[in-house]
Image: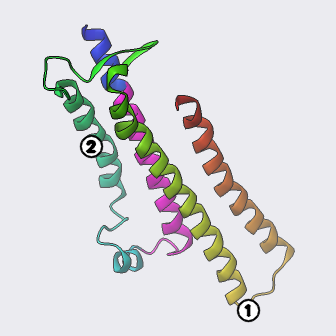
Amino acid sequence: NLLCQLQAIMITQTNYTSVILSTCMGCYAVYLIKFKGNARQVAKHLTLDISDEPYLITLAFVIPAVLSVGFLFWQPDGDDISLYGGAQQWCWIRPAFGQHQFYLWFMWLLVAFVFNFGILLVVQLYWDTYLRGKSIIYTRELHQSTIVINHRLQAYLFMFVIIWLPST
């Protein structure tokens, strides 16, 4: 059914895109905090220059689009049964291909969560050591800004879990 296939493509597209974009936001947090927005410093550590943000965002939409349409034509068992089809209350990867549901979605969601959690730890540890390494007076305002940054990073990870936990 065409509508079912279209729904499966849209679910796959939006799921992958949002996970990739949230991971890009985590990387951008490191870019802003650790490297102070200096693209040249990031380029020393990465082969991909994060200042190419428009290209990264474009890739976050293009790669999932190619995958989601590609899955439409994929027949894992080699017969004429597409990967997409009725999956309980919506159309997505058929229940008969449960291992594909895990490998094509849940595994990547778990990887993104662990990666984003690692980003959160790196940024918090860097911020704490940065403040301690500088011989600056730890004022009440600086303490408050540190609390705000930590709360926002934790809220980012919390929202990632809130958004994706029900789908698992």
Question: Which label is found at residue 63?
Answer: 2
Mark 1, secondary structure of its residue? loop
- Label ID, residue 35: none
Q: Quadrant of the N terminus?
A: top left
Amino acid type shown at disc 1: Ser
Q: Quadrant of residue 105?
A: top left
Above/below status of 155 relative to 80: below
Image position of 164 with respect to 84: above or below: below
Q: Earlier in the sequence, mark 1 or mark 2?
A: 2
Q: Nearer the viewer, residue 48 or 121?
A: 121
Answer left or right for 166 relative to 152.
left
Residue 85 percent across, percent down from the top left: 30, 16
Give residue 135's mark. Answer: 1
Residue reaching furthest bottom?
135
Observer-side mark, 1 or 2, equals 2
Which quadrant of the figure has residue 67? top left
Asked whether, in this view, residue 22 is left or right of residue 126, the answer is left
- Residue at x-position 33% and y-position 21%: 96
Which residues fall within the magenta stretch?
11-38
- Residue 90, percent from left and from top: 42, 14
Count residues near mark 2 (Cα–Cα under 10 Å), then give few for <14, some for 14-19, many for 20+. Answer: some
Q: Residues within 10 Å of mark 1 (few under 14, many from 20)?
A: few
Outermost residue, right side = 140
The x, y position of residue 69, in whole percent, is 22, 29
Amino acid type for the residue under numbered disc 2: Ile
The reply to whether residue 93 is in sight is no
